[in-house]
Image (cartoon, grey):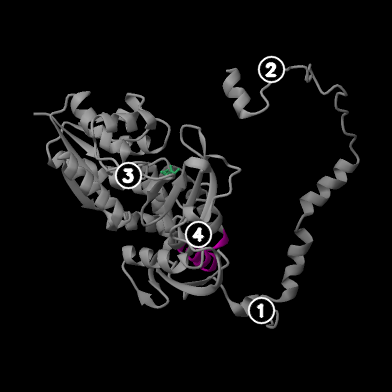
Amino acid sequence: MTRVALAFSGGLDTTVCVPILEEEYGYDEVVGVTVDVGQPESEFEEAEETAEALGLEHYVVDAKAEFAELCFTGVKANATYQGYPLGTALARPVIAEAILEVAEEQNCDAIAHGCTGKGNDQLRFETVWRGSDLEVIAPVRELGLTREWEIEYAAEKDLPVEAGDGGVWSIDTNIWSRAVEGGELENPDYVPPEDIYEWTAEPEGETTIEVAFEAGVPVAVDGEEMAPVELIQYLNEYAGQYGVGRTDVMEDRMLGLKVRENYEHPAATVLLTAHGALEDLVLTKGERSSKKSIEQEWSEKAYQGLVFAPVVDALEAFIDETQTAVTGTATVKVSGGSCRVVARDSEYAVYSEEMASFNTEDVAGIAQEDATGVAKYHGLQERLANEIHAGVEKPELAADGGADATDSDDTVAETADDYLHEN
Ligand code: ARG
């Protein structure tokens, strides 16, 4: 008896994978696993109904708490990739782990997903699974399936897929973000219609929101303490009413493809803005600038689905070291779809009003005139260099601009489309 666990959503791709795993790959039994990272209720209903209609052994695993914890690690890292707070990317390793656990418990020999060969998710899932002894299967990629073929196959096999399954857009939702792509959005010059948005209202109105942090972790909103999942869900709804947290990204995927993606992430925007603002108050200049490059590294790895990498542990050790002082509050104003800090407060502020004020005299035994020596030295090397350079003649550049840099090459592609079709 051979068994294969399948990452199952009940959508077209994963539904056609069920008979294919039996018929093409020869497995006796398919086990569907749906992982809850905060998708809307309707997605679970669809998964349950489809599983039932298929007679599929089906498990639903709630991983929202683990996922929220990773989102908050993302907050400590001020993590974004090309402007997007990494919702899909952070969810994938959590989902992959949860499915692997079920696969092992259920004595499966293999583990499968319905991702295409074009996206990031195949890489994010498989890097987790390939660390196990299970065989990894990617039917859509391996058999080169297209949407049209799947629709025809589903009709032939009388599979329980709804007509126009999934609607016009491809949507990926979890508590951290809602990603929308496909259809007309594939044209980067197409302005998204309001109806792609579900979490964010057309930006209008304004309010202020105060977030409290303890060691970098959000713990309360407007004075009300909340558990991580609840806090994120609350802010998605509350800040979403003010149209906060929409991004329209030309995203460079891991395989090199550039793809247009639209995101909604009200809670992530509020929490990242507030967290960054509190850090600005409590971290030293050196910590802030060193942390920037650490954050960049963390975000890249997270985008690649490699949050379990040893280097990520090392980066997090640095991040956590800086977070001990990130306790206090930051208040953001959400207005007209924007989110900006308007106040911050912490007992760990590396800030002295007395020192910074224009109205006070000497502090810490330092008088204004003590800066005179510093002012004399400041830029000394640059002033000296300019003086020396003024006396040196610059070498002439060759007039023809170097070896045959002519414009006679008419095979040069003018657009990406020309390139595709010429090569
Ligand atoms: N491009 C995003 C990522 O790789 C999201 C992919 C899923 N998006 C979707 N609308 N199905 O992280």
Q: Nearer the viewer, mark 4 or mark 1?
A: 4
Secondary structure type for disc 2:
loop
Q: Find disc 1 in the rendering and name its residue.
A: 357
Up the image or down, 304 lies above or below 70; here it is above
At label 3, counting other C-alpha atoms closer than 10 Å, the crowd grade (few under 14, some 14-19, many 20 or more) is many
Which comes before the other along the chain, label 3 or label 2? Answer: 3
What's the CA distance linking mark 4 and mark 3? 24 Å
Instruction: Give amino acid for label 2.
Output: Thr
**Is disc 3 in contact with disc 2, using a CB cutoff of under 8 Å?**
no
Which comes before the other along the chain, label 4 or label 3? Answer: 3
Q: Residue at x 82, y 51 (%)?
A: 383
The label on residue 93 is 3
Q: Find disc 4 in the rendering and name its residue.
A: 245
What's the CA distance linking mark 2 and mark 4? 43 Å
At label 1, counting other C-alpha atoms closer than 10 Å, the crowd grade (few under 14, some 14-19, many 20 or more) is few
- Left/right of residue 335 with respect to residue 149 in the rendered view: right
Q: Nearer the viewer, residue 149 or 202?
A: 149
At label 4, counting other C-alpha atoms closer than 10 Å, the crowd grade (few under 14, some 14-19, many 20 or more) is many
Up the image or down, 30 lies above or below 36; here it is above
Q: Which region shows up in magenta?
A: 271-285
Secondary structure type for disc 4:
loop
> How far across and down, in percent of the image, does residue 23 sit?
19, 25
Q: Nearer the viewer, mark 1 or mark 3?
A: 3
Which comes before the other along the chain, label 2 or label 1? Answer: 1
> How far across and down, in percent of the image, does residue 311 sit?
39, 43
Which comes before the other along the chain, label 1 or label 3? Answer: 3
> From the image, which quarter does the N terminus lie in?
top left
Q: Find disc 2 in the rendering and name its residue.
A: 411
